[in-house]
Image (cartoon, helix red, strand yellow):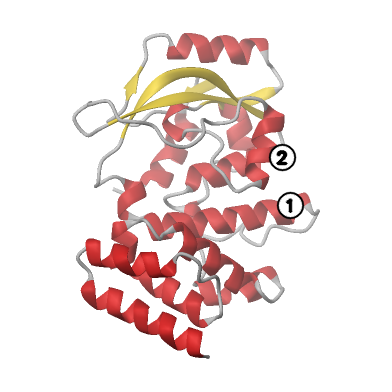
């Protein structure tokens, strides 16, 4: 019971086959998924990772309407998607070469709950990544999954992974490379050696959590309030007050309204 990252790295270390398929226990793999992905890796020896499009379903397998764009297909599209800060490969639909993942140190413990995104960004510098435009995995969504229960930590880690990727792209050392745990948000300026990083990340995370019920009931709300006190973007915030009332959080709705009124007056 050491957590997902430690378990993933142990399995990668023990794996004897040159190809590893990743999957979660509550998802459903299409019968021809492995065939399609193995064929792709065989035909593209310069690619270390291949994913696929996925199909969303509810907790009990019921179909769900999918929103948002599908994952990028080619490596060039993957790089463009990384630059935009978007997701590149569905983790439980991924298949990768064991030795390529081992060579970059596997999953990093500091990026708990977004360990896959950090791994894809590190791999993108040493190999090619792609997705097959077929829905080879049915991905289960429900209120208790990691992306719902740990949305603030996930958004925070994603923002740091993106910054670390930008550092590597610029030829600078990655300050997260040896971390076992990400530092508090107010220490990011010191970690990256320049001012403004804390404010940038706080804004990115706060705005990314506006629709998360769990985050707005927990520490994501405090990030949002501090973001506003720092003079951050205010557009859409009065709608967030209404949303908090719908979430059953009248005290936090009142606190956000008071923060908006105070910052407006200033």
Quarter of image, res 214: bottom left
Counting from the top left corner in percent of width and height, residue 111 is at: 49, 53
Q: Which is more toward the observer, 153 or 181?
A: 153
Counting from the top left corner in percent of width and height, residue 265 is at: 49, 90
Q: Which is more toward the observer, 155 or 40?
A: 155
Q: Crowding at label 2, few (<14), some or many (≥20) Cα neighbours within 10 Å?
A: some
Q: CA distance from mark 1 to mark 2?
A: 9 Å
Counting from the top left corner in percent of width and height, residue 180 is at: 51, 60
Residue 2 tag number: none
Q: Which residue is mark 2?
A: 125
Q: What kind of element bears circle 1?
A: helix
Quick one: which residue is furthest to the right in this view? 171
Q: Name the residue at 60% across, 58% down.
A: 178
Q: Crowding at label 1, few (<14), some or many (≥20) Cα neighbours within 10 Å?
A: some
When the figure is inspected, residue 158 is found, relative to residue 51, above or below; the finding is below
Q: Name the residue at 54% across, 31% down.
A: 71
Q: Are marks 1 and 2 in contact (CB under 8 Å)?
A: yes
Q: Which is more toward the observer, 2 or 39?
A: 39
Q: Which residue is mark 1?
A: 168
Upstream in sequence: badge 1 or badge 2: 2
When the figure is inspected, residue 135 is found, relative to residue 126, above or below; the finding is above
């Amino acid at each position: 019971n050491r957590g997902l990252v430690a378990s993933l790295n142990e399995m990668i270390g023990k794996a004897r086959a040159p190809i590893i398929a990743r999957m979660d226990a509550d998802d459903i793999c299409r019968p021809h998924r492995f065939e399609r992905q193995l064929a792709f890796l065989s035909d593209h020896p310069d690619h270390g990772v291949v994913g696929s499009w996925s199909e969303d379903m509810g907790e009990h397998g019921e179909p769900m309407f999918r929103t948002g764009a599908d994952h990028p297909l080619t490596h060039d599209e993957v790089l463009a998607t990384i630059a935009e800060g978007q997701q590149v490969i569905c983790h439980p639909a991924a298949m990768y070469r064991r030795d390529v993942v081992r060579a970059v140190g596997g999953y990093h413990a500091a990026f708990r709950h977004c360990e896959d995104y950090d791994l894809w960004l590190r791999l993108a510098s040493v190999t090619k990544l792609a997705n097959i435009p077929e829905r080879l995995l049915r991905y289960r969504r429900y209120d208790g999954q990691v992306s719902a229960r740990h949305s603030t930590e996930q958004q925070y880690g994603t923002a740091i992974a993106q910054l670390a990727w930008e550092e590597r792209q610029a030829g600078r050392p990655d300050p997260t490379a040896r971390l076992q745990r990400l530092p508090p948000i107010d220490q990011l300026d010191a970690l990256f050696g320049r001012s403004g990083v804390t404010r940038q990340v706080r804004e990115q995370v706060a705005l990314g959590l506006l629709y998360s019920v769990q985050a707005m009931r927990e520490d994501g709300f405090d990030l949002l309030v501090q973001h506003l006190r720092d003079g951050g973007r205010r557009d859409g915030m009065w709608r967030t007050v209404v949303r908090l009332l719908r979430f059953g959080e009248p005290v936090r709705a009142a606190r956000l309204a008071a923060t908006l009124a105070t910052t407006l007056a200033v």
